[in-house]
Image (cartoon, grey):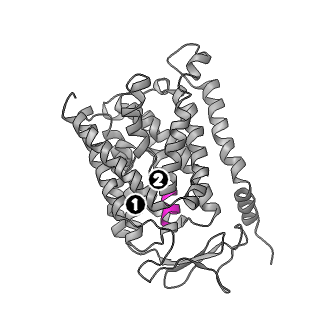
Amino acid sequence: MSIPPYSRIQKWFLKYQHFFVFAAPVLFVVGVVVGAPTEMSNPGTDYWLEYWWLFPAFLAGATIVNTVGISGSAIFVPFLIFIFPLFAQPLEPETLVKVGLISEAFGLSSSSVAFIQYGLVDRRLALTLVGGSIPFVIGGALLSFIIPEAVFHALLGIALLAAAYLLFKTNLDHSGDSDGATADGGTASAGLPNDSGKLGPAGVHTDEEGTVTRVDRDGDDYTYTRGGYLRRAANYSIGGTFQGLAGFGIGELGLISMLGTKVPVRIAIGTNHIVVALTAILASLVHVFGGGLVGGHSLSLASTPWNMVVFTVPATVTGGQIAPYVSNALSTRTIKRFVAGLFGIIAIALFLMAAGPW
């Protein structure tokens, strides 16, 4: 049986995905340095190297969030609010969200390709969730231009508290069955799907009753259904609004909704990367171009702090590729509890900022 050309191209792309993934930020940085409009007429080396220290900070943050499967801006935005001003000038809310979203979009796109390579992404489910989230992401992004800074900090604190609670509550272990009904990482046996366009024994099959059988690159198999669309739609609408407003939210609420509808943990995390990456790209575009549509701050391309993103983008892409290895080496439960505790502390600080001067 001959292999279709599309399958050969897909397999070739996944086999050499590291080259394409790391080529993207290189091309982005070169394009920014050569052609991006800035508020300076002729920015020199000092301008472009001013924020080099953001690389290790965003590398660590991207590795953590991609390991757990949540939005990168959940860490990036608080970092830019509290830590960044210690070494530089404070940023306006819409600017720091924009930096967080641009960086997150690259980082999650990087890790998304890695999860696709391992056969852990349900693309049909992901595209459905993204399609339903689009109007809420756009609405939240436009809202960010017109709300007062104190309200922004309060809403950000609420989102972080909700994310912390959901992370504490959710079991993100990558092994074990989901209440006995959903196999999560069993050993593949004869008769399971095997797609010639994927690496290893990976493949997927959906029967007439809607039951999905998926095999990943390592030969582990997963069985589940795509039911529960209404429950997920409610979570993704709320999460999408916060994704546009603050740069995160859809990843945390989306992950919970997928696990609640009995999608296996590793499939839920992999699929969630696609959803968060695509909505982050959409929100980034609205944050860059959409201010004038609502009578708020009209942000031109020149106002984007390009000398920041030339370091944050490569850092998040690298972190996205490191995350799968960290996930195998460390306990996801330990990372999850650390992130949830950090969210709680940051949320309290945000509430104090919203209440008035410290």
As for residue 252 lying within the magenta part, the answer is: no
Instruction: Report which residue position mark 1 lands on.
Output: 254
Q: Residue furthest top?
A: 41
Q: Earlier in the sequence, mark 1 or mark 2?
A: 1
Report the residue marked by disc 2: 276
Q: Are marks 1 and 2 in contact (CB under 8 Å)?
A: yes
Q: Kindly indicate the quadrant of the structure image that contains residue 298.
A: top left
Residue 97 lies, in percent from the top left, at 40, 37
Q: Residue at x 55, y 13 (%)?
A: 41
Q: Nearer the viewer, residue 349 or 130?
A: 349
* Residue at the (26%, 48%) spot, across then down: 158
Decide: few, some or many residues near mark 2? Use Cα within 10 Å; few <14, some 14-19, many ≥20: many
Above or below residue 8? Residue 73 is above
> Where residue 228 sits: x, y (%)?
38, 73
249 sits to left or right of 128:
left
Image quarter where the N terminus lies is bottom right
Magenta span covers which residues? 268-275
Q: Residue at 63% across / 64% down in the picture?
A: 118
- Which amino acid type corresponds to the residue marked 1 in the rendered image? Gly
- Whether residue 238 appears in this view of the structure is no
Q: Position of residue 46 (x, y in %)?
A: 58, 17
In percent of width and height, residue 185 lies at: 56, 75
Where 353 falls versus 234 (above or below)? above
Q: Residue at x 31, y 30 (%)?
A: 296
Q: Quadrant of residue 238?
A: bottom left
The answer to whether residue 272 is magenta is yes
Secondary structure, magenta segment, majority class: helix
Task: Inspect the image, locate mark 2, and give the three-letter code of the amino acid beneath it.
Answer: Val
